[in-house]
Structures are given as structure tokens and as C-alpha cells.
Amino acid sequence: MRMSCQFEAESVPVSYRMMFVSLIKQALKSASDEYFQQMYYYDDKSNKQTKNFCFAVFLKNYEKQGDDFKLKEGLDFNISSPDRTFMAYLMNGLLGTKSFSYKGYMLERKGMHMLPEKNIFEEKVYFKTLSPIHIVDKHEKPLSPCDEAFARELNYTADMMLTNFRGDGLKRPLEFEPVNMKKMVIKEEISEFQKNTGKKYMYLESYGGTFALAGDVNDLKDIYALGLSMRRSQGFGMLEVI
């Protein structure tokens, strides 16, 4: 399932992804506090388990001023998930959210609609990123699609993601073929990183563009719905079939 929400806003922070993480959390909590607690907490601690969704934010007619993006035509917030329970709670929560405030920034919801999904029948699919792909190795070193370890870590990430969603991982290894991928450095404010390092911003090396992915058809269908990246629930890895 895919959904798009249209918001009006005068500005958003350059590190806007956590703003939309907060929006998702507020929407879920307003729809069902019990469901929200199950998703984000375990034994009164943060639940680190991967989440079954990804999202992308599209700023329309904007310019950067300092640490803000000034918007002239608002933004679109798109989200994808194969988990119908999650999407039902999220939609109900967003329908009840006319406005949302985050660190002095304000969003006003103007519309919401479902997005069409493309069918996957082949074992090789061409995708474009709607939000960038972020992959690191076991030492937290960011990897580019040209790195030898990229395919291994991408497969590990996809296997864990699918296991969490459906109970079993990849049916066979994925083959990743970059077509036109460009490096993107994402600047974000993440509280855990700030607490551990004392630094305000975390810089996340990631890659956006077009690529081919070969694998089992059912795996590719679920990856299309779930996204493909680390930190998917923080605004990474949303894909579209091309």
C-alpha cells in the first residue's frame, strides 16, 4: 500500500526526516497508543527491530536559507508499507491531524490519497530511488555501490528486513546493478547520536538514482513495498519501478 499526504508549510529544517518520523509516531499514537507502544518500545526500552515501512518527502519549489528550506508550494509526504494494520492506523491518525508542530515548524495537511502500485512479474526489475539508499558495513563504514562489500551488506539488510516482516528471509541472493547512482550526504538531527557524540548533526552517506535488482519475484515485490536501505523508517530506501 502507498499513500501520499500533501502539506502546506512556510519552511522545514534541512534535517527534516526526523520531523516526519515524529509525525508518524504522533499519528500512530493518536490512532492507537497500544499499537504505538508495541511498535516503538519493548520492556520500556526503544524497540530497535526494523519497521515495515519506508517514506520519502518531496519539497516543491524551495530554496535553502541557512538551516531551513523555504517552501513556496508545500510538500508531499509519501509512505509505503505492505503491513495493512500499520497503514490503517497511520491513515486514521493522519486524518485526525489537521496540523502538526515540530520544533517551531508547522505543517498544515491539505490532502491525502492512495498511490497506485506497479506489478512485478520478472526476476530483474529496474528501480529509481524516491529516498536514498544508505548501507554500512559492520564497522559502521558507509558503502558505495562500487564497494566490494556493498552487495553483501545490502543482502544482509534485505534478509533481516524480510525476516522481520514475513518470518523468512531472502529466497535467493539479490544482484544489485547500479545504472546511474549518485552520492548524497544527508544531514540529520538524531537524538541518540547527539547523546553519544555531543554533535548536533549526523551526516549519512547515501546514494540515489537508478539501478537494476535481480532476485526472486516475491522478494522483489516485498522489497518494492518495504523499501531497501538501512534506516528505512527514518526516510531512506523508498523505491519506484521504472
Image: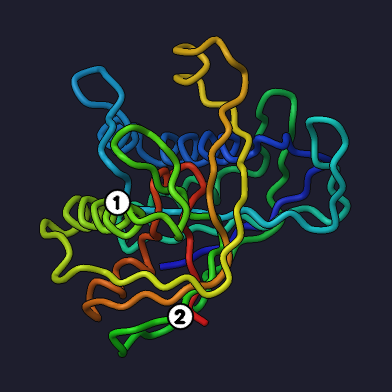
At x 25%, y 76%, the residue is: 215
- Looking at the picture, tell me which residue is in the foreground, 118 or 15: 15
Dividing the picture into quadrants, the one containing residue 30 is top left
- Looking at the picture, tell me which residue is in the foreground, 196 or 29: 196
Q: Up-down: is 29 above or below 174?
A: above
- SS of the residue under disc 2: strand
Q: Is residue 2 left or right of residue 202?
A: left
Q: Which amino acid does label 2 sit on?
A: Tyr
Q: Up-down: is 75 above or below 115?
A: above
Give the foreground label among 2 and 1: 1
Q: Name the residue under label 1.
A: 153
Q: Is residue 68 left or right of residue 28?
A: right
Q: In this view, does 51 lie to the left or right of 199?
A: left
| Callout 1 crowding tier (Cα within 10 Å): few <14, some 14–19, many ≥20 | some
Q: Name the residue under label 2.
A: 126
At x 79%, y 44%, the residue is: 9
Residue at the limit of the structure toward the bottom, as seen here: 121
**Residue 134 visible in rendering:** yes
Q: Spatial distance from mark 2 to mark 1, Cα to Cα?
A: 20 Å
Q: Residue 100 carries which label?
A: none
